[in-house]
C-alpha cells in the first residue's frame, strides 16, 4: 500500500491511524515505511507533546511510543530505499509529497505501479493540475522523468482509492459556525483557498448570516486591506 502524505500534520495523523489499526488487529502487522520530509517533521512533533491532543499527550506521557513504534521503519539512505523497493514483502509506505509532485513517493509509485496487488491510497486533497489529481480522474498512463533525465511512460495497474475525512482544513459547517459566533462581527469577509464552486456556495450562505461585505476573489485578483 502506497500512501502519499504531506510532511506536516497529515503524515503524523496517518501514522497514528495505521498504528492503531495494527494494534487492534484490524489490518495485518506489516512494516510501515516512512520516507521523505515526514521523518524530520515527525521528530519535531515528538519534541512538543504539550501540543498533542489530550488523548495522544496522555498516551505519550504514559509511555506509549506513538511515532517511535517498532512498526515504523525510517528510510535512512538511497541504498536503504533501493532495498525496500526490491522487496516483495507486504508493506505500507508513507512518503512525501502528498500530491505526487516530487519527493521519494515517485520512486515508490514507479516501482509499485505495475502490480494489481498494490494499492495507491490518497488521504489528502489533490489540487487541479497535479499528478495526484490526474490519477484520481482516471489517468493510467503516467509520464515521469527518470534518473537519466529522460521521459519514461509506465502503466498504472495498481488499484487507486481515496479516503476522505483527513482534511487539514475546516469544513463548510465549521466555517459557518465560526462566523455565527465570532465577536465582534466582521465588516468584511474574504473567502479564498478552495474550489470555486465550494467558495461561492459558502459565500452565499455567509451573506445570509452576516451583515458584511463578502468577497470571493479569483487567482490574481487584488484586494487592498486598509
Image (cartoon, rainbow, N blue to C red):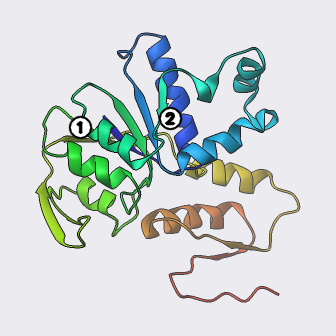
Q: What element does badge 2 sit on? A: helix
Please say whether residue 120 is visible from this viewpoint: no
**Viewer-proximal residue among 33 and 75:** 75
**Viewer-proximal residue among 140 and 184:** 140
Give the quadrant of residue 68: top right
Which residue occupies 44% across, 46% down? 77
Q: Position of residue 188 (x, y in %)?
A: 75, 75
For marks 2 and 1, the one nearer the N-term is 2
Which residue occupies 78% across, 20% down? 61
Give the quadrant of residue 51: top right
Q: Quadrant of the N terminus?
A: top left
The residues bearing labels 2 and 1 have C-alpha atoms spaced at a distance of 24 Å
Q: Which residue is mark 1?
A: 86
Q: In the shown orientation, is residue 20 left or right of residue 125?
A: right
Q: In the shown orientation, is residue 219 left or right of residue 121?
A: right
Q: Quadrant of the C terminus?
A: bottom right
Q: In the shown orientation, is residue 181 left or right of residue 151?
A: right
Which residue occupies 50% across, 41% down? 166
* Mark 1 Cα-neighbour bin, 10 Å: few <14, some 14–19, many ≥20: few
Residue furthest out toward the top:
25
Q: Position of residue 184 (x, y in %)?
A: 88, 62
Give the quadrant of residue 99: bottom left
**Viewer-proximal residue among 2 and 214:** 2
Residue 138 vs 190, above or below: the answer is above
Q: Position of residue 86 (x, y in %)?
A: 23, 37
Nearer mark to the viewer, of 2 and 1: 1
Which residue occupies 36% across, 17% down? 27
> How many labels were placed on the picture?
2
Residue 43 vs 21, above or below: the answer is below
Q: Which residue is mark 2?
A: 14
Amino acid at each position: 500500500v502506497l500512501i502519499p502524505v504531506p510532511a506536516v500534520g497529515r503524515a503524523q495523523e496517518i501514522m497514528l491511524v495505521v498504528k492503531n489499526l495494527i494494534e487492534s488487529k484490524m489490518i495485518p502487522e506489516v512494516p510501515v515505511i516512512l520516507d521523505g520530509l515526514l521523518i524530520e517533521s515527525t521528530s519535531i512533533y515528538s519534541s512538543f507533546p504539550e501540543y498533542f491532543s489530550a488523548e495522544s499527550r496522555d498516551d505519550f506521557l504514559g509511555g506509549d511510543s506513538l511515532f517511535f513504534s517498532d512498526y515504523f521503519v525510517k528510510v535512512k539512505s538511497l541504498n536503504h530505499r533501493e532495498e525496500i523497493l526490491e522487496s516483495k514483502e507486504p508493506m505500507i509506505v508513507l512518503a512525501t509529497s502528498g500530491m505526487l509532485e516530487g519527493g521519494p513517493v515517485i520512486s515508490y509509485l514507479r516501482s509499485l505501479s505495475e502490480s494489481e496487488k498494490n494499492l495507491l491510497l490518497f488521504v489528502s486533497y489533490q489540487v487541479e493540475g497535479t499528478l495526484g489529481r490526474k490519477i484520481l480522474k482516471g489517468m493510467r498512463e503516467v509520464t515521469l522523468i527518470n534518473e537519466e533525465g529522460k521521459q519514461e511512460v509506465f502503466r498504472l495497474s495498481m488499484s487507486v482509492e481515496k479516503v476522505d475525512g483527513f482534511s487539514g482544513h475546516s469544513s463548510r459547517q465549521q466555517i459557518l459556525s465560526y462566523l455565527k459566533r465570532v465577536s465582534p462581527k466582521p465588516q468584511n469577509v474574504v473567502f479564498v483557498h478552495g474550489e470555486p464552486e465550494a467558495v461561492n456556495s459558502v459565500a452565499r450562505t455567509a451573506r445570509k448570516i452576516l451583515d458584511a461585505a463578502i468577497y470571493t476573489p479569483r487567482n490574481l485578483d487584488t484586494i487592498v486591506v486598509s
